[in-house]
Image: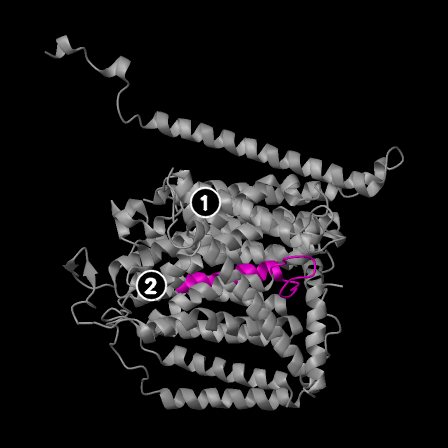
């Protein structure tokens, strides 16, 4: 086992454990903090895959923005300490576990049998990867349309978010 | 990859550096505690009501606007790095991207969502 | 040969002699490097607590610390010892784990930036090709620390302080990220060592071609640190002390140390991104001079932050948000739309004129710098004009008191 595999196994186990904590904690802020650990574990995995740009974006966007927003929203809207009403698991937990297990085994079997999935070509040189990404994003034979559509999509998200979250003054009066 | 090994070691050491004085402080600091000392206080009074009260929606709106901007700006960094090899169209595409971002700000502004009331 | 590199090689050879595998030797070398960098950052921080008190005192016509050691230089040690005599309290109802992790995280998030800071052309922790985004990403742990501290303390003031702090931190991250994009665009690289290398001459220094980006970055960084005039997150008179109100002794000290270190770190980053970092005359012959230049520039910027702290009053929370969303962000967006266009069209201008004068590269450079400088100044003047007009309109719209000469009735008449 190479050192890299050791690091991978440690981070993978930590990531999955933290993910389990996210869904099983009753305290919502604790769940969100475990989510941060999960997201950080994913960032480490990006590093191991030699994708540093994705790793820093993962930390910047997911931990720095989305997780913070979630904790914010939880604190702003409800009383977390007393939010103990209801069980963490309902009576369908066994069913859900079975379905999840079946989907997982299906994925393992199908992807495991697909030769291209197992033999990923190693990326020859990652030093210019960010530049290549930028070029692909903004060139006509690349993804320039997707690039602009993404911008439109985010604009729509912003407009929608403000429209939904902003208390309308007319109705209050 | 070696660079990131360095960063990994740095994270571990950076965690140990501030933890050491705190642990030392915990071990050697004086302990003359009583339940009253540890009570939450508000200007010398006992606290009224629960701590986790609801707060202004304005905080949440700023966080939302920030999130959208954060995601958008991240796209621009690879574009800036590749600037030398971009044709005019690529440059204009990036500028248009920023223009659409500015549009969102104008909407929020006109809507009054940036107002701290 | 660089003395540090020689030392490292000697160390590796030494380890090879006692039959350690080279990978282990490399890791040990990294570990030593990490400890050295982190120690340097901490020692500078400790020194800065003294420097700041001394300079703030001078600016207020006082003497400052002068009892402990020569010129009061040992004052930080006395402060640390005093902190050790404080009691370690954890408030009742606090979330113990989050409460204890938060101060550590606050320091870690700042300390991690030093992993990529280039001290000289050869002395740096490591080079990342995504260093600029790495710095921004690491900063988000600081936001997390604030939220954790405020929430886990089980105190209304702490939670309110945390909300204020986080909304300020994330708001100012927008102009920060936007203005960080300008040096990246001009250097065509996210590696901050490369960004420094690109600023070889005075004309190439990014502050010359992009003074507006420099200002935006500096202002939003100061707001990120939460220093005066942006210290509303610890407004003593309103919310007592902010998110760290329940912390005592060294745990509080860690937040304070993190803030001091952050202030110097943003000064160093300003020096690196806009003032050319270790670049300076004769630096190619004597790389060690780079350290002097880098530290000189960093402390110069640091002095400005201290100066601001002693001079400016705290701004109001609505003004703080308006300054960000209605001034800094729009200006940064306009700057970001114009800079690439100007840059693109002046890229090959030098070749056009090369028949007449000098070398094309140099000419391109000066044309580019000049055009960008003009763009920056135009945006700056335009922004100032717009702000002036809107302030005028706002004051006209709501005259709080009638003006003396027209509205006030003569006293005899009233009687």
Q: What is the x, y in percent for residue A122?
A: 72, 78
Chain of the residue under the numbered disc 1 shown in the image: C
Give whichever of C412, C125 is nearer the camera.
C125
Q: Residue at x 45, y 41 (%)?
A: C307
The residue mark sitting in front, 1 or 2, is 2
- What colour scheme was applied to this rendering of the protein? one colour
Quarter of the figure with the C terminus of chain C: top left
Residue C136 drawn in magenta: yes
Q: Residue furthest front?
A: C70
Q: Return the mark for residue C306.
A: 1
Q: What is the x, y in percent for residue C379?
A: 58, 35
Give whichever of C111, C349 is nearer the camera.
C111
Q: Residue furthest top?
A: C412
Image quadrant of residue C2?
bottom right
Q: Which residues are magenta?
A: C117-146
Q: Tag 1: Cα neighbours inside 10 Å, few (<14), some, or many (≥20)?
A: some
Q: Residue at x 68, y 56 (%)?
A: C288
Same-subunit check for callouts 1 and 2: yes
Q: Return the mark for residue C83.
A: 2
Is B26 drawn above or below residue C359 in the view shown?
below
Q: Residue furthest right?
A: C355
Image check: C313 left or right of A139?
left
SS for callout 1? helix
Image check: A10 left or right of C347?
left
Residue A116 visible? The answer is no
């Amino acid at each position: 086992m190479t050192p890299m595999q050791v690091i991978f196994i440690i981070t993978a186990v930590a990531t999955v454990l933290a993910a389990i904590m996210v869904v099983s904690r009753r305290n919502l802020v604790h769940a969100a903090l475990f989510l941060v650990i999960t997201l950080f574990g994913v960032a480490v995995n990006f590093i191991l895959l030699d994708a540093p740009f994705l790793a820093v974006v993962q930390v910047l966007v997911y931990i720095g923005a989305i997780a913070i927003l979630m904790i914010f929203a939880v604190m702003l809207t409800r009383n977390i300490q007393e939010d103990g009403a209801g069980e963490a698991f309902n009576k369908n937990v066994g069913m859900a576990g079975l379905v999840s297990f079946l989907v997982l085994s299906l994925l393992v079997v199908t992807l495991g049998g697909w030769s291209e999935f197992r033999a990923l070509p190693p990326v020859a040189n990652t030093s210019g990867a960010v530049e290549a990404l930028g070029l692909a994003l903004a060139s006509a034979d690349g993804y320039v349309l997707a690039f602009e559509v993404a911008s439109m999509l985010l604009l729509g998200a912003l407009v929608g978010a403000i429209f939904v979250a902003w208390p309308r003054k007319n109705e209050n009066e | 990859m070696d660079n990131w090994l360095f960063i990994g070691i740095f994270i571990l050491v950076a965690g140990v550096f501030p933890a050491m004085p705190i642990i030392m402080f915990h071990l050697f600091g004086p302990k003359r505690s009583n339940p009253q000392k540890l009570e939450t206080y508000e200007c010398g009074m006992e606290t009224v009501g629960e701590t986790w009260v609801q707060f202004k929606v304005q905080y949440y709106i700023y966080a939302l606007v920030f999130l959208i901007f954060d995601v958008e700006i991240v796209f621009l960094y690879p574009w800036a790095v590749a600037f030398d090899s971009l044709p005019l169209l690529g440059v204009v595409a990036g500028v248009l991207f920023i223009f659409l971002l500015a549009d969102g700000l104008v909407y929020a502004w006109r809507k009054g969502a940036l107002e701290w009331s | 040969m660089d003395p540090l590199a020689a030392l490292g090689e000697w160390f590796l050879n030494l380890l090879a002699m006692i039959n350690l595998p080279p990978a282990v030797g490399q890791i040990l070398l990294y570990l030593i490097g990490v400890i050295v960098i982190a120690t340097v950052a901490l020692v500078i921080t400790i020194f800065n607590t003294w420097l700041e008190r001394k300079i703030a005192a001078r600016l207020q016509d006082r003497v400052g610390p002068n009892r402990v050691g020569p010129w009061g230089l040992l004052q930080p040690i006395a402060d640390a010892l005093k902190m050790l005599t404080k009691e370690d309290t954890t408030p009742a109802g606090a979330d113990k784990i989050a409460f204890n992790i938060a101060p550590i995280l606050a320091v870690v998030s700042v300390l991690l930036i030093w992993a990529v800071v280039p001290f000289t052309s050869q002395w740096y922790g490591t080079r990342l090709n995504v260093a600029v985004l790495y710095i921004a990403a690491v900063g988000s742990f600081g936001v997390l620390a604030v939220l954790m501290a405020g929430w886990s303390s089980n105190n209304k003031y702490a939670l309110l302080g945390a909300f204020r702090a986080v909304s300020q931190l994330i708001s100012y991250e927008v102009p920060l990220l936007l203005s960080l994009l300008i040096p990246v665009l001009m250097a065509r690289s996210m590696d901050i060592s490369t960004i420094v290398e690109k600023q070889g001459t005075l004309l190439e220094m990014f502050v010359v071609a992009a003074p507006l980006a420099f200002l935006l970055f500096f202002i939003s960084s100061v707001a990120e640190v939460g220093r005066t005039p942006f210290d509303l997150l610890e407004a003593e008179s309103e919310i007592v002390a902010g998110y760290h109100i329940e912390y005592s002794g060294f745990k509080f000290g860690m937040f304070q140390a993190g803030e001091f270190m952050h202030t110097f770190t943003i000064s160093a980053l300003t020096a690196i991104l806009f003032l050319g970092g270790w670049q300076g005359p004769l630096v190619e012959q004597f790389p060690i001079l780079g350290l002097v230049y880098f530290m000189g520039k960093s402390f110069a910027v640091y002095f400005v932050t201290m100066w601001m702290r002693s001079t400016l009053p705290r701004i109001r929370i609505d003004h703080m948000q308006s300054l960000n969303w209605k001034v800094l962000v729009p200006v940064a967006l306009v700057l970001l739309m114009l800079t690439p266009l100007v840059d693109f069209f002046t890229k090959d201008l030098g070749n056009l004129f090369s028949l007449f004068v000098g070398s094309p590269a140099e000419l391109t450079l000066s044309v580019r710098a000049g055009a960008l400088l003009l763009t920056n100044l135009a945006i700056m003047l335009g922004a100032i004009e717009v702000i002036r007009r809107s302030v005028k309109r706002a004051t006209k719209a709501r005259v709080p008191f009638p003006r003396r000469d027209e509205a006030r009735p003569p006293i005899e008449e009233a009687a």
